[in-house]
Image: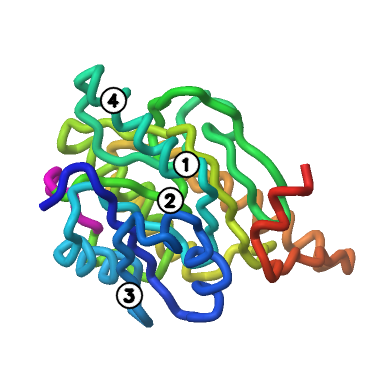
Amino acid sequence: MKQDNVTIVAAVNNRVVLQRNLSLSPDIRNGNMQLITKHNFPSAALAYNEAIDEADNDVIVFVHQDVYLPETWLPGLRKSLSCLEKEKTRWGVLGCFGSKPGGPGGIGRVYTNGMGFHGNEIDKPEPVQTLDEIVLVIRKSSGLRFDPTLPHFHMYGADICLSALEKGMKSYAIPAFCVHNTNQIVNLPKEFYNCYRHVKSRWSKYLPIYTSCITISRFDGEIHRRRIHEAVNRFLGKSIMPASRVEDPRSLLRVE
């Protein structure tokens, strides 16, 4: 198993989206990183656990198929790994965008279609409670695995960060900018709430759990507020047109 190289993993349900986004990333296109794709799995956890077994390298990066990693991304990752190694930090999970209690609106700078540039810029790894699923980094040697009973494709970032915490490892947002060229979601689907309940039940001792899109709490306050807001909008006939994925994610880097 190689220590210095990186394996990229993507769960794929649309090959065209993969080809027009993640596969355009310079270090993937140039063959600088091993790429493993898992197609049409029922959940991210099952896809990713299988990929962990297949990875040739110790550092494994799980990335959405519609994420673009610019040329600065791999150097940013390697610089962060060197920093954590120098400080002899026992880290579990790294990512590009994280959340923590009492923290700013998002730790780490990213671009998300429909939201634009967001998150707070950082210049070194910053400890967080959870990380957004757009990019997650683990070491194969850590023994971390995704919860195979977690359904669908939501909340697995929070789940594996809490798994790391349970094993005495910390999670960090790192300065490694990326572009999430997604179809914007205005209302969260029922699958999201299934995953919310699963994580809430499994990690109840860590409540409240702060994630990039919702706070998991004992009395589900944020869920109730969201549903009231959505109901009011429906009653008033208000609708929000979500942003659609652009054809070339590199064009989004020129809009700031």
Q: Look at the image and give the residue range highlighted in magenta.
A: 141-146
Where residue 54 appears, x then y in whole percent?
17, 66
Q: Which is nearer the N-term, disc 1 or disc 3?
A: 3
Note whether residue 218 is visible: no
> Residues under labels 3 and 4: Cα distance?
30 Å
Q: Nearer the viewer, residue 153 or 31?
A: 31
Where residue 7 appears, x then y in whole percent?
28, 56
> Residues under labels 1 and 2: Cα distance?
6 Å
Dominant secondary structure (helix, strand or loop) of the stretch shown in magenta: loop
Instruction: Indicate the secondary structure of the residue bearing disc 1.
Output: loop
Q: Is residue 233 left or right of residue 199?
A: right
Q: Which is nearer the N-term, disc 3 or disc 4?
A: 3
Instruction: Indicate the secondary structure of the residue bearing disc 2.
Output: strand
Q: Which is nearer the N-term, disc 2 or disc 3?
A: 3
What amino acid type is highlighted by mark number 3? Answer: Lys
The correct choice, above or below, for 86 with respect to 215 in the image is: above
Picture quadrant where residue 38 is located: bottom left
Where residue 251 appears, x then y in whole percent?
72, 57
Q: Quadrant of the C terminus?
A: top right
Q: Which residue position is annotated with label 3?
A: 38
Are dots 3 and 4 in contact, CB under 8 Å?
no
Q: Which is nearer the N-term, disc 4 or disc 1?
A: 4
Disc 4 residue crowd, few under 14, some 14–19, many 20+, Cα 10 Å:
some
The verdict on residue 121 being magenta is no
Task: Return the mark for residue 234.
Answer: none
Q: Which residue position is annotated with label 2?
A: 135
Q: Nearer the viewer, residue 141 or 212?
A: 141
Q: Which residue position is annotated with label 1?
A: 96
Are dots 1 and 2 in contact, CB under 8 Å?
yes
The correct choice, above or below, for 186 with respect to 107 in the image is: below
Q: Which is nearer the N-term, disc 4 or disc 2?
A: 4
Q: Which residue position is annotated with label 4?
A: 84
